[in-house]
């Protein structure tokens, strides 16, 4: 009998040692995947219709084992650098609460919700805890109601409910100072790019208090808030006006302009009716509302642009925002034609019913070279569209150009999906880090290093011909994440101009009067630590548009890529 006990102890010890060693060799993403697989295995048992007591018991055992795994020292150390792994216990407790509820063990279910609350996590838990119907049998239990009340109080605090006041034409001074203070505090504790901003944020806040209290309308107030966040010099840190003011701030006629060699030209027109009034690409803008266009932009546009780089600022100042203003206030523009004729036109900012924006994705084959334009990474169907194009046309080409010069971003995963079809090997995506705050006297923020991402090749589609990517200052956010991954894997050359230099994960929040704001809470780099936020991604081959190109409809960057691939 003693021998049997000794053998059992030896087996348990060896098993523990094996598991500990195995855990020490897991990456954070592998640990995350294991926890998710355990959850999936357990959920398959308690989510099924009429699970047996044995199945419920097994699901709970799996989830308990998952908690032990997540609480082990090697995994906890990994979780310190991976927010998503760290949050797995938070989700496991919810799984266990549902499993216990289905098993009729109400007290145990409520205990799991209490542990989940103690674990910390989303401050929005109170808003979605009602979305789990399996918890219905415990919803009237005193313990459940007590936990929900705690969640609501926590949510109200962290979601800044007291600041979410209704719109009125002129907010109170208290609301105005509260909104400014919220912007200051959210940036102080979440913003990741203060080194780039290069300002004394506390002093800036003090300087802006009299500015906000001096405003006479909510519209004036929001202009001050917008300029306040513009001091942070970050394209993912912005203030947005209330819905009641969007027409006053963001209305613009359907054509785009660009600063080329120090002069401003019309480059795109999105309305046929406007085009027929002779507003066409190639027109030079000399004046806006009687002011020389450069002076107008410097005075009226630039102070209100949140921008990470000079090239991004140029785009915002002379392209995105140059013609924006009140919808009921037409804009007077003095143009010069290619032949030198000066003409003046008063143009409505709204009222066009034939506006056609850029297509999400466009493709053509030019002399056996594929030319694929992707203008955003927001449309979830982009991957399927690419697959269809690959089968029908791209696979037959001898080279491919991917144009993301007008891609302002969206979901990074959509871009990585495209890259996965350009390789037969795993590839790396951006590395990132977040701020970590410790509540101790004298403590300053530290960094949580999330490492870089690793993505697998698609496996079904592999385009192995040469690829070039066209980039420019409008290449932004998720499109820069795409560019970083493509550049780092050395799949092909980048052609064009430096990108906008801004990506990250914004932290969004509400402001008094119905407005909103966001502050960048994640700092990204190349996988090897090379910086591009606040700098831009530089092309391998620089091609800048010239006035001659604009007047003659020449796309020099595309032509360069075609020349290299022919």
Image (cartoon, rainbow, N blue to C red):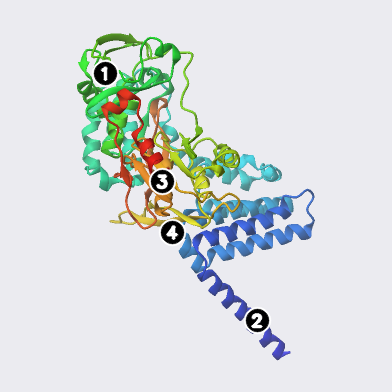
Q: Nearer the viewer, mark 4 or mark 1?
A: 1
Q: Is residue 134 above or below residue 558?
A: below
What's the residue at 51%, 34% (across, down)?
363
Regarding residue 538, the answer to whether it shows in the image is: no
User: Which residue was labeled with disc 2?
Assistant: 11
C-alpha distance separating marks 1 and 3: 33 Å
Which mark, residue 483? 3
User: Which numbered disc flags the more N-terminal residue, 1 or 3?
Assistant: 1
Q: In whole angstroms, how far apart are the C-alphas of marks 3 and 2?
A: 51 Å
Q: Which is nearer the N-term, disc 4 or disc 2?
A: 2
Which numbered marker is on residue 550? Answer: none
Measure the alpha-carbon separation of dots 4 and 1: 51 Å
Specify the quadrant of the image occupied by residue 348.
top left
Residues under labels 1 and 2: Cα distance?
Answer: 82 Å
Q: Secondary structure at mark 1?
A: strand
Residue nearest the viewer, comparing 517 with 339: 339
Indicate which label's residue lies in the foreground, 4 or 3.
Answer: 3
Badge number at residue 285 = 1
Query: On the rendered structure, is 80 left or right of 286?
Result: right
* Residue 205 placement: quadrant: top left
Ranked by sequence position, the earlier of labels 4 and 3 is 4
Q: Which residue is mark 4?
A: 81
Badge 4 or badge 1: first in the primary sequence? 4
């Amino acid at each position: 009998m003693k021998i049997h006990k000794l053998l059992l102890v030896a087996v348990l010890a060896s098993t523990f040692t094996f598991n500990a060693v195995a855990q020490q060799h897991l990456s954070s993403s592998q640990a995350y995947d294991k926890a998710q697989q355990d959850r999936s295995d357990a959920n398959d048992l308690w989510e099924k219709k009429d699970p047996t007591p044995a199945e419920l018991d097994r699901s709970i055992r799996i989830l308990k084992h998952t908690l032990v795994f997540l609480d082990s020292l090697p995994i906890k150390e990994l979780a310190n650098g991976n927010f998503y792994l760290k949050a797995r216990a938070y989700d496991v407790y919810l799984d266990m609460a549902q499993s216990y509820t289905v098993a009729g063990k109400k007290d145990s279910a409520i205990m799991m919700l209490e542990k989940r609350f103690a674990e910390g996590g989303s401050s929005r838990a109170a808003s979605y805890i009602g979305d789990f119907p399996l918890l219905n049998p415990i919803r009237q239990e005193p313990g459940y109601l007590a936990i929900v009340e705690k969640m609501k109080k926590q949510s109200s605090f962290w979601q800044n409910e007291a600041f979410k006041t209704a719109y009125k034409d002129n907010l109170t001074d208290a609301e105005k100072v509260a909104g400014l203070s919220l912007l200051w505090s959210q940036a102080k504790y979440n913003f990741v790019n203060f080194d780039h901003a290069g300002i004394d944020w506390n002093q800036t806040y003090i300087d802006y208090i009299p500015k906000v209290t001096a405003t006479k309308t909510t519209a004036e107030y929001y202009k001050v808030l917008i300029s306040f966040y513009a001091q942070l010099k970050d394209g993912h840190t912005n203030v947005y006006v209330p819905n009641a003011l969007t027409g006053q701030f963001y209305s613009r006629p359907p054509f785009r302009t660009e600063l080329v060699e120090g002069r401003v030209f019309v480059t795109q027109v999105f309305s046929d009716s406007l085009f027929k009034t002779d507003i066409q690409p190639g027109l030079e803008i000399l004046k806006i509302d009687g002011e020389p266009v450069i002076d107008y932009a410097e005075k009226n546009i630039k102070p209100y642009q949140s921008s990470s780089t000079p090239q991004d600022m140029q785009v915002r100042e002379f392209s995105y925002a140059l013609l924006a203003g009140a919808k009921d206030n037409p804009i007077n523009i003095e143009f010069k034609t290619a032949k030198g004729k000066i003409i003046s036109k008063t143009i409505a900012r709204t009222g066009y019913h034939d506006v056609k924006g850029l297509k999400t994705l466009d493709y053509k084959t030019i002399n056996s070279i594929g030319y694929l334009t992707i203008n955003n990474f927001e449309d979830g169907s982009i991957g399927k569209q690419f697959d269809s194009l690959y089968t029908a046309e791209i696979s037959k080409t001898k080279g491919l150009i991917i144009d993301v010069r007008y891609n302002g971003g969206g979901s990074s995963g959509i871009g990585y999906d495209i890259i996965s079809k350009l390789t037969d090997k795993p590839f790396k995506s951006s590395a990132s880090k977040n701020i970590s705050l410790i509540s101790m006297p004298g403590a300053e923020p530290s960094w949580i290093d999330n490492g870089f991402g690793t993505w697998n090749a698609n496996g079904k589609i592999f385009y192995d011909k040469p690829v070039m990517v066209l980039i420019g200052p409008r290449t932004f956010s998720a499109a820069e994440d795409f560019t970083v991954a493509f550049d780092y894997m050395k799949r092909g050359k980048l052609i064009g101009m430096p990108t906008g230099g801004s990506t990250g994960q914004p932290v969004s929040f509400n402001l008094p009067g119905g407005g909103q704001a966001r502050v960048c809470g994640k700092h990204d780099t190349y996988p090897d630590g090379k910086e591009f936020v606040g700098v831009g991604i530089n092309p391998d081959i620089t091609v800048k548009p010239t006035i001659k190109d604009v007047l003659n409809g020449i796309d020099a960057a595309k032509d360069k890529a075609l020349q290299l691939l022919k």
